[in-house]
Image: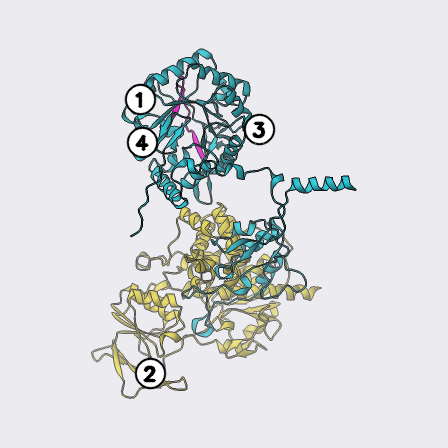
Chain colours: A yellow, B cyan
């Protein structure tokens, strides 16, 4: 797939957060692994990658075997090795924490194995078994659908992925910070899934019951892996100013659309991982000041601790209990002047109260809202018989099956927005559920 | 103020006349190839050096060494196909003289290997003694190359040759004659006895072990590669220490073999040295560790040994030399009623479960992961645990929603279900779990017996008694 996203300036500004391990360093690190039985790292991984096994294989010079061990559990092992918050997953569970030692660098070892795999042709072993006639459609080309499609293809089912955008990969391609995962690395992973025989249809946004009816007619099962929709607006005066750009649009802009411009003083609103990604990206793109405004305190932020620590170290200024109330354009022309905020207090009931008369302004010429994505309610409602709860698709967690037995679902539209590895786990579980349902139907 | 204690005396007197300021000698090998090296070694603190074997100069091949690494640790074992000295005899002799002149209180022992002719041995013995050597070491151990020419281990594998050539050397020698033994033989005592019958004043053991260290999996050529071919070499380094310790013990425990012994084989630090001394050796020889790290390691060896001796109250080497020899017995004398069992100290357990899988697959299935689940109807097998874990759904914790403990600053306790339990009724006290446990002191083997000691010999003697009575 395309390499036109490889912008040297982008590379210079976004050096990798966790650069690859040198081959011998990987062996040294792999040899530290204790090879725990029924290992806690494996249990902590949503896709249950057999971590000690893939690490042992690196130590033994069997790097292809290591990569296939990873891919056996997680077809997106390469992107997960880069974007997973390993300190709360595999590495957080490493027994070395209780032994006064650094945990094994599982993420970097996984990347080492996956880089080797992609550098050597990215060939998966041919799967034996009959081709199946039942067809599956996956809606959305993000991690959940990719994992679902790859698993079903390997079991002989024809799979088509429908994607509204022109590039596959979902947030892996468009929404993950550049210093974690580059679009080219996401796309080569999608290419590997395609090489299994998965069909992709781009620019085919499915909307409306008629479109779904047509798909239902052609396919036996539909997997819904559509993720989430547009980011929430701030809904305050001035939020329609052109210098107010939501975090995902901002990230996508510099990653895949070549937009390397950024304000001199940037205010990011929100304290989730995407807010942190946007704030750190703004610094890398050349912003002199980056302010992060959050209406609650550090204990309530949804960003992982390490993300926060890194952002702080890089110079992002955090403003807690600060709520934006208006965005002011500059008097001179078409730029921004500031974002007006109020102080917020938590009252006895735990709800937030604005402190009267506490208004102040944070000078900025760009505002990046990062307060979450809306669910794709319109689409989800058009899927017949899909039950939602709190705007999330309800599924049987073991099988991924929805309230409509022909619909399965996984990823952000089910879990409300978690990690890539969660979407992959959902997609794979759903694939097994689909295979079981289709095989059961034939017995 | 604390009392000041005198430093222990590390000096040794080997076979009566060979004095050395400490028991650490360099073995006959590349580190003792020339006088310049030996001088630097003595400056670094080595007490003695056995000169790289002197004889008719040979021609060597390239390459000569290969090694075995273990889990990232380099040179756990080293293999060589180098022959004896390739330097002219007169140069070696002159340098021995120079070294002895400058280091009169260090031990210089000449390792010798010549044709199996009486005259040849008489000549070489006279030459090196005239040069000033404090002792002689007859190289009857080298297992590669020289053995094809009727020397080295070709002599050391035949008791009659060993006895004969030892006696030839003794006919001329004024200094102690040590015989260096090959381990490439069924029972090292047969050669040790022959050397003793031939009049040897001491022994050195072990020489290297026949080996092929590895095969290059791309070219299918064994290592070391000499233009597409290899040859068996001599194996040494940490890997061979247990074999060497056993052979040292065999020699020391056999009245017909026992002689002052210079212990060799995988000695890398003071602890290794102390073990050889406890098994009766009067000095130790080191090669691989020096080839790996240089002469400087002797300072750590001397320091470690001194500190240990002080801690144990030993003023000199003779105070502890050989203490362990009577502790090695035939199996039939071991106490069958001695009973220990494994105890897992929960507060130290990190939850790796290596003891569990080792006990299940490698021992006696008496460690269980049932502290939470209970033993119920029998015990779960390792495969059952793995299957069960695979089916559990895990998700990435979101800090403010899930309040997950993982990943936050530890130390936090090992979950109870990850701490194995020992079935003390079933435990046979084999030690395996305590050997695989990565945490020092987490699994102890505790004594639980309450029967009077009884060996196999005593038990079977009792049985035959009973038979008689019946």
Reading the image, the residue beneath label 2 is: A344
Separation of marks 4 and 2 at Cα, in angstroms: 77 Å
**Quick check: do tags 4 and 1 share a chain?**
yes
Mark 4 falls on what kind of element? helix
For image coordinates 33% across by 37% down, the residue present is: B296
Q: Are marks 4 and 3 in contact (CB under 8 Å)?
A: no
For image coordinates 32% across by 44% down, the residue present is: B5
Numbered disc in front, either 2 or 1: 1
Q: Quadrant of the C terminus of chain B?
A: top right
As drawn, the residue found furthest toward the left would be: A332
Reading the image, the residue beneath label 1 is: B95
Separation of marks 4 and 3 at Cα, in angstroms: 36 Å
Mark 2 falls on what kind of element? strand
**Residue B77 visible at all:** no
Where in the figure is residue A108, as x and y percent of width and height?
42, 55
The range drawn in magenta is B51-66
**Quick check: do tags 2 and 1 share a chain?**
no
Reading the image, the residue beneath label 4 is: B42
Q: Quadrant of residue B12?
A: top left
Q: Is residue B63 one of those drawn in magenta?
A: yes
Q: Residues within 10 Å of mark 1 (few under 14, many from 20)?
A: some
Where in the figure is residue B316, as x and y percent of width and height?
38, 37
Kindly identify which chain the residue marked by label 4 belongs to: B
Mark 3 falls on what kind of element? loop
Reading the image, the residue beneath label 3 is: B186
Pick the front one: A255 or B225: B225
């Amino acid at each position: 797939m395309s390499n036109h996203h490889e912008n040297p300036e982008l590379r210079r500004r976004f050096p990798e957060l966790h650069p690859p391990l040198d081959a011998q360093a990987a062996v040294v690190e792999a040899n530290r692994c204790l090879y725990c039985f029924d290992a806690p790292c494996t249990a902590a991984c949503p896709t249950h990658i057999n971590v000690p096994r893939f690490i042992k294989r690196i130590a033994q010079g069997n790097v292809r075997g290591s990569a296939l061990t990873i891919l056996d559990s997680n077809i997106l092992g390469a992107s997960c090795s880069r974007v997973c918050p390993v300190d709360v997953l595999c590495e957080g569970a490493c027994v070395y924490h209780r032994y006064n030692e650094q945990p094994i660098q599982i993420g970097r070892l996984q990347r080492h194995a996956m880089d080797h795999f992609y550098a050597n042709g990215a060939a998966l072993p041919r799967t034996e078994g009959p081709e199946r006639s039942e067809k599956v459609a996956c809606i959305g080309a993000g991690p959940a659908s990719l994992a679902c499609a790859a698993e079903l293809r390997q079991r002989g089912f024809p799979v088509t992925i429908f994607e509204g955008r022109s590039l596959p990969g979902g947030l892996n391609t468009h929404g993950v910070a550049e210093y974690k995962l580059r679009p080219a690395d996401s796309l080569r992973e999608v290419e590997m899934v395609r090489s299994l025989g998965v069909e992709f249809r781009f620019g085919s946004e499915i909307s409306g019951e008629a479109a779904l009816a047509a798909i239902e007619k052609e396919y036996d099962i539909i997997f819904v892996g559509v993720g989430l929709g547009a980011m929430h607006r701030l809904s305050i005066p001035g939020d329609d100013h052109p210098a107010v750009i939501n975090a995902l649009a901002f990230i996508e802009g510099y990653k895949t659309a070549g937009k390397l411009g950024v304000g001199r003083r940037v205010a990011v609103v929100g304290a989730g991982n995407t807010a942190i990604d946007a704030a750190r990206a703004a610094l890398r793109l050349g912003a002199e000041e980056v302010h992060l405004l959050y209406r609650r305190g550090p204990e309530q932020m949804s960003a992982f601790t390490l993300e926060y620590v890194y952002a702080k170290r890089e110079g992002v200024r955090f403003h807690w209990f600060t709520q934006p109330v208006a965005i002011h354009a500059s008097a001179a022309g078409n730029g921004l002047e500031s974002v007006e905020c109020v102080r917020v207090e938590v009252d006895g009931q735990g709800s937030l109260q604005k402190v009267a008369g506490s208004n102040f302004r944070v000078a900025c010429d760009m505002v990046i809202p990062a307060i979450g994505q809306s669910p794709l309610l319109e689409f989800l409602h058009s899927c017949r018989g899909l039950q939602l709860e709190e705007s999330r698709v309800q599924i049987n967690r073991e099988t991924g099956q929805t309230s409509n037995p022909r619909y399965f679902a996984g990823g952000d539209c089910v879990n409300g927005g978690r990690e890539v590895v969660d979407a992959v786990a959902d997609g794979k579980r759903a694939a097994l559920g689909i295979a079981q349902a289709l095989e059961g139907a034939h017995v | 103020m604390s009392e000041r204690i005198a430093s222990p005396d590390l000096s040794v007197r080997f076979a009566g006349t060979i004095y050395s300021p400490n028991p650490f000698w360099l073995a006959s090998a590349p580190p003792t190839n020339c006088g310049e090296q030996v001088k630097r070694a003595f400056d670094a603190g080595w007490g003695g050096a056995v000169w790289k074997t002197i004889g008719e100069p040979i021609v060597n091949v390239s390459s000569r060494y290969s090694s075995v690494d273990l889990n990232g640790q380099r040179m756990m074992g080293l293999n060589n196909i180098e022959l004896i000295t390739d330097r002219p005899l007169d140069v070696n002799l002159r340098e021995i003289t120079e070294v002895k002149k400058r280091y009169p209180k260090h031990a210089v022992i000449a390792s010798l290997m010549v044709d199996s002719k009486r005259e040849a041995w008489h000549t070489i013995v006279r030459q090196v003694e005239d040069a000033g050597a404090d002792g002689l070491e007859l190289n009857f151990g080298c297992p590669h190359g020289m053995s094809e020419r009727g020397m080295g281990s070709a002599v050391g594998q035949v008791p009659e040759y060993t006895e004969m050539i030892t006696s030839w050397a003794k006919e001329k020698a004024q200094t102690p004659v040590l015989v260096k033994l090959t381990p490439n033989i069924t029972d090292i005592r047969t050669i040790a006895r022959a050397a003793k019958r031939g009049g040897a004043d001491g022994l050195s053991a072990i020489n290297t072990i026949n080996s092929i260290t590895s095969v290059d999996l791309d070219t299918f050529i064994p290592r070391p590669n000499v233009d597409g071919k290899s040859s068996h070499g001599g194996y040494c380094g940490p890997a061979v220490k247990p074999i060497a310790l056993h052979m040292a013990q065999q020699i020391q425990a056999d009245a017909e073999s026992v002689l002052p012994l210079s212990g060799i084989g995988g000695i890398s630090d003071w602890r290794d040295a102390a073990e050889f001394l406890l098994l009766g050796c009067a000095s130790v020889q080191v090669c691989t560790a020096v080839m790996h790290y240089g002469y400087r390691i002797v300072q750590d060896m001397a320091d470690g040994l001194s500190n240990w001796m002080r801690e144990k109250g030993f003023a000199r080497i003779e105070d502890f030399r050989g203490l362990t020899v009577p502790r090695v017995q035939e199996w039939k004398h071991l106490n069958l009623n001695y009973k220990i069992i494994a105890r897992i100290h929960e507060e130290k357990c990190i939850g790796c479960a290596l003891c569990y899988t080792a006990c299940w697959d490698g021992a006696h299935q008496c460690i269980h992961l049932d502290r939470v689940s209970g033993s119920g109807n029998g015990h779960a097998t390792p495969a059952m645990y793995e299957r069960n874990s695979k089916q559990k759904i895990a998700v990435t914790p979101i800090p403010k929603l899930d309040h997950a403990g993982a990943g936050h600053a530890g130390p936090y306790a090992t979950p109870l279900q990850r701490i194995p339990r020992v079935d003390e009724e079933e435990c046979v006290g084999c030690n395996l779990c305590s050997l695989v446990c990565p945490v020092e002191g987490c699994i102890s083997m505790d004594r639980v017996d309450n029967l009077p000691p009884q060996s196999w010999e005593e038990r079977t003697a009792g049985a035959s008694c009973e038979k008689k009575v019946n």
